Amino acid sequence: MNTDLIRDLPPSIRPMARLQNLGVEALKDPELLSLALRSRSLKAPEELLAHHNLKELLAMPWARLMSLRGTGEAGAAALLATAELVRRANNQSEPGRLVLQSVNDVAAQAIEIRDKKKEYLLAFFLNARHQLIAKEVISIGTLTASLAHPREIFAPAIGQAAAGVVLVHNHPSGDPSPSDEDVRLTRRISQAGQIMGIELLDHLIVAESGNCFSFKSQGRLA
């Protein structure tokens, strides 16, 4: 955008009008930053973003923000307040949701598949605070890439707005040691999660004996 002043833009494409008409998700980074800084132009936010990405700006201390051209005292305060609100929202637990922090926490929620005679693959969808959003059976039968394709896992993860996924499946043989197929599948799902922005937090293999194998604990998540 070449014009310096927001007031010189056609009313329909000013940041506030676009927010009202299209929703905040439609705004570009300089537009969002101009609203946060209450800037009269888009030039200052664009220059800020040319030298610092949003993550850097929101992590800066007060003195550093104050020194940046185009922020000022009010702008620095607005960015610090925004960063703190985001931090608090991410750390705020939702009452009533089960928190899964450890291997034992997850294994306890998969106890019903330990003695199954077929392999069951479960997916636990978690929010950013490791609270359980949903739990789904992904496949039943011999665990193969076709039965546990990334789309079968990440389609419901996206629908649940999950931040992370934990997979659990059972070994009817009683030995929770991972097979070559288990290793390949874990690597494939982990890589797909990195692309999707939904982390594979762990993959557990459980057995009727109560023994359990954790890819994360063994340092074998791809």
Image (spheres, rainbow, N blue to C red):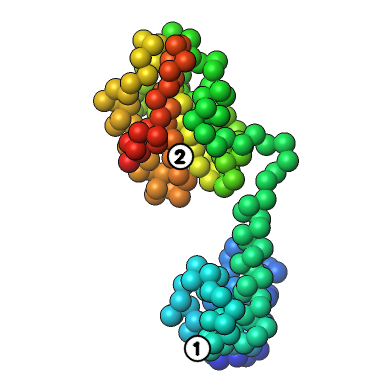
Using residue 133 as the reference point, say whether residue 203 is left or right of it: left
Relative height, residue 11 to residue 106 (above, below): below
Q: In 3D space, how far apart are the residues under numbered discs 1 and 2 (Cα atoms)?
A: 45 Å
Disc 1, SS: loop
> Can the viewer see residue 45?
no
Check the image and name the residue furthest to the right: 95
Mark 1 or 2: the one toward you: 2
The amino acid pointed to by label 2 is Leu
Relative height, residue 59 to residue 49 (above, below): above
Q: Earlier in the sequence, mark 1 or mark 2?
A: 1
Query: Measured from the top left, where is residue 144 in percent x and y?
Result: 34, 23
Check the image and name the residue furthest to the left: 180
Query: Measured from the top left, where is residue 181 in percent x and y?
Result: 29, 25
Q: Which residue is mark 2?
A: 201
Q: Give me the residue at 32% from left, 24% from top.
A: 178
Disc 1 crowd rating (10 Å Cα; few below 14, some 14-19, many 20+) is few
Relative height, residue 4 to residue 115 (above, below): below
Q: Which residue is mark 1?
A: 2
Disc 2 crowd rating (10 Å Cα; few below 14, some 14-19, many 20+) is some
The amino acid pointed to by label 1 is Asn
Q: Quadrant of residue 105?
A: top right
Q: Quadrant of residue 74?
A: bottom right
Quarter of the image with the C terminus is top left
Using residue 47 as the reference point, say whether residue 88 is left or right of it: right
Q: Give me the residue at 48% from left, 71% from top.
A: 56
- Pointers 1 and 2 in contact (C-beta within 8 Å): no
Q: Give me the residue at 63% from left, 61% from top.
A: 86
Query: Measured from the top left, where is residue 114 in percent x and y?
Result: 48, 14
Using residue 143 as the reference point, say whether residue 11 is left or right of it: right
